[in-house]
Image (cartoon, helix red, strand yellow):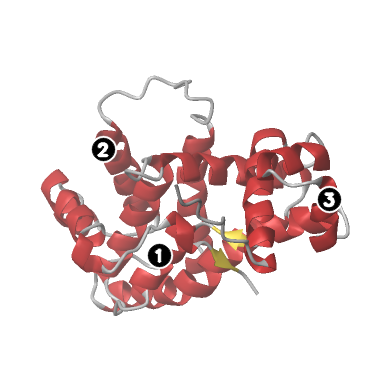
Amino acid sequence: MVIMAKKKMSGEDRKVGITMAARKMFAKKGFYGTSIREIAKAATVSEALIYQHFDSKTALYENAYFYIDPIIDALCEYFKHHEPSTETLVQIIYALSYIILSEIPGHQDEQKLFERLLVYSLLENTTFAKSVFMKYDKELTPLWVSSMATAKENGDMYEHLIDPIAKMWLSHHLAMAINFLQLSGETLFPYHGSKNDLIRGIVVFILRGIGLKDSVVRRHAQPDNLQEIGKLIFSPSSGLDFSIDKAVHME
């Protein structure tokens, strides 16, 4: 019987393994509730080895927070290839609402981890939350603003009474607030209908709120139209890659 030697992990691979184990622990118990001993056990390494890579729990915490959720990164990459338009504006709103409020098949655990990290970040240390929102701001804000301007030029939108960037964040925060109310797994408010009905209701609410005209909202927010948008965004040919193994490190 031939016993294959176990391949030794590189220092960088070990560091990443510690970081990802720490993410799970911080998502479960927060910074103050998590010990280096618990992280070492989760990563199957010694505490001494962790300190070879990180000077302190704070350093590990900050490093763990700089691994951005791969779904966000994939979404931003997808919209890089879009031209400003009313249709693009609707797609951004639908995509954000869907990703925030739905579970991407095969990625439920990573989504829940991400959501809990975000909540703890808002409660304890805003480093992670800021890095997430900076990603949105850098990648989506220019396209959002130019699409708002295009919609206005095409006569699809009323006069801006609120700053366009504020409208984007209000749209995002509305979906996030509803999602936070469901983090326990229990629905606190009995929204009637399916999850898709809820998402459509939010999309319609946002489209009206940002100032799109009623005729435009009716045209884009019909269930069949939103279903087609969903198929377009989340089809294999869209280029979206939700691989958990491709978490992106923010510089």
Disc number lying in front (1 or 3)? 3
Q: Position of residue 245 (x, y in %)?
A: 47, 59
Establish if 34 lies above or below 15.
above
- The amino acid type of the residue labelled 2 equals Asn
In the rendered structure, which amino acid carries the disc numbered 1?
A: Ala
Vertical position of residue 146 compared to residue 4: above or below: below
Upstream in sequence: badge 1 or badge 3: 3
Q: Which residue is mark 3?
A: 57
Q: In the structure shown, which secondary structural element does the residue marked by tag 2 occupy?
A: helix
Does residue 160 appear in the picture of this structure? no
Q: Is residue 146 left or right of residue 6?
A: left
Q: Name the residue beneath numbered marker 1.
A: 74
Q: Earlier in the sequence, mark 2 or mark 3?
A: 3
Crowding at mark 3 (Cα within 10 Å: few <14, some 14-19, many 20+): some
Q: What residue sits 29% from the left and 47% below the top?
A: 204
Q: Residue furthest left?
A: 224
Structural crowding at the residue carrying mark 1, measured as other residues with C-alpha within 10 Å and reported as few (<14), some (14–19) or many (≥20): some
Is 3 situated left or right of 27 in this image?
A: left
Q: Is residue 135 visible?
A: yes
Is 54 situated left or right of 156 in this image? right
Please state the horizontal and vertical placement of residue 229, each as a whole percent of the image. 20, 57
**Residue drawn 27% across the image and 74% down it:** 85
Q: Disc 2 marks which residue?
A: 196
Side of 51 where 206 appears, left or right:
left
- The residue located at (46%, 52%) in the rendering is 2
- Residue depicted at 45% across the width and 55% down the height: 244
Task: Identify the amino acid type marked 3.
Answer: Lys
Q: Residues within 10 Å of mark 2 (few under 14, many from 20)?
A: some
Mark 1 secondary-structure assignment: helix
